Image (cartoon, helix red, strand yellow):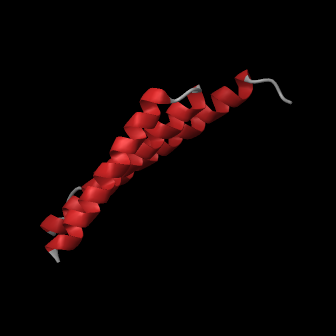
Amino acid sequence: MSWVFAVTFALLGVAGLLVVVRLLRGRTTLDRIVSVDVLVTLIVAGSCVGMGLQQDGSNIALLAAFALLAFIGSISTAKLIEKKEPYR
């Protein structure tokens, strides 16, 4: 069963590297905002996989709060950008 965790961590790591590249090379502000949101999601997913590996669910409330805070931040910045750009 440990190979499943190793493969999952490897895939999350590759996805994290791709997201960081997109964050650094993003052309628009919205690209960077989405990249940060995906990076937070990957961090939460990696933490959940780590908790599954250790069979310890004591930090699940903290991860849920962190994910909710990231979601609210993404929604508020998207609304802010929507107000800045003129309608087409």
**Residue 85 screen position, x and y as percent:** 74, 24
The one nearer the camera, 10 or 61, is 10
55 lies above or below 61: below
Quarter of the picture containing the N terminus is bottom left
Residue at image coords 19%, 64%: 6
Residue 75's quadrant in the figure? top right
Relative horizontal placement of residue 53, taking residue 64 as reference (left or right): left
34 lies above or below 86: below
Residue farthest toward the right in the current orientation of the protein = 88
Number of marks present in the image shown? 0
**Residue 68 screen position, x and y as percent:** 45, 48
Residue 20's quadrant in the figure? top left
**Residue 8 screen position, x and y as percent:** 28, 63
Residue at image coords 52%, 39%: 34
Relative horizontal placement of residue 82, taking residue 75 as reference (left or right): right
The one nearer the camera, 54 or 42, is 42
Quarter of the picture containing the C terminus is top right
Residue farthest toward the bottom in the current orientation of the protein = 1
Does the rendering let one see residue 50?
yes
Relative horizontal placement of residue 29, taking residue 47 as reference (left or right): right
Does the rendering let one see residue 66?
no
25 lies above or below 75: above
Residue at image coords 71%, 21%: 84
**Residue 16 screen position, x and y as percent:** 35, 45
